[in-house]
Image (cartoon, helix red, strand yellow):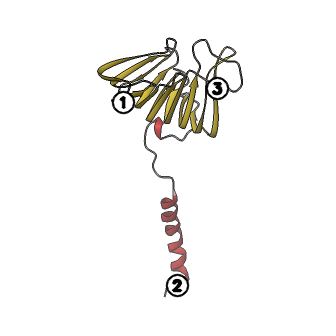
Amino acid sequence: MIGRGSVFRLLPSSLLVLLAACGRPPAASGPASEPPQVVLHGVELQSFEADRIVLAGRAERMTYQRSEGLFAATDTVLRLPSQGGAQRAVSGPQGAMEIRAPLMEGSLSTRQLEASGGVVLRTAEGVVARTPRATYDAPAQTVRGREGVAMQGPDFALRADQFNLSLPEGTFSFEGSVETVVGGAP
């Protein structure tokens, strides 16, 4: 049987063990391990240049690190207007280009983002491009992919190793191996 004095001697050491076990896990080093400063759910996005909306969309969830200007968004859809079609309407651009991805990460200061997890680009003309990863560069007004692309249009299909999309011109260019089938799928 344990006496009353024994219980009081065990209590402080037991509390220390319990507190140590319940403490925060050791944090990994680096900025990626820090919790976001802002977490938003059901986000509607709009990006402006002067009074024009140049990008609009939505994300299921978005995190933001204010100090670095970094963000990450999940289940995201972005719409970019045609070059002459930037709109002032609150609903945002109905767009010449739509970009969908499970994950988009980027920087507000550089105005660039990396879309990954199976990216789908859709033009107003009905062309659909699928790629594992794509980079959107707002200042250069380009989208590029270096991990292959499969495209399907109304009367063609194409596969290529890499692509570049000029948003002002609305044109794709391809690098590496390119396979095109007119009137069907490759």
Reading the image, the residue beneath label 2 is 3
Residue furthest toward the front? 183
Could you tell me which quadrant the C terminus lies in? top left
> Tag 2: residue type?
Gly
Which x, y percent locates residue 72? 52, 35
Looking at the image, residue 44 sits to the left or right of residue 35; the answer is right
- Residue at screen point 52% across, 18% down: 138
**In terms of secondary structure, where does tag 1 sit?**
loop
> Tag 3: residue type?
Gln
Reading the image, the residue beneath label 1 is 185
> Which disc is residue 46 wearing?
3
Q: Is residue 67 above or below residue 164?
A: below
Asked if marks 3 and 2 touch (Cβ < 8 Å), the reply is no
Q: Nearer the viewer, mark 1 or mark 2?
A: 1
Earlier in the chain: of badge 3 and badge 2, it is 2
**In terms of secondary structure, where does tag 2 sit?**
loop
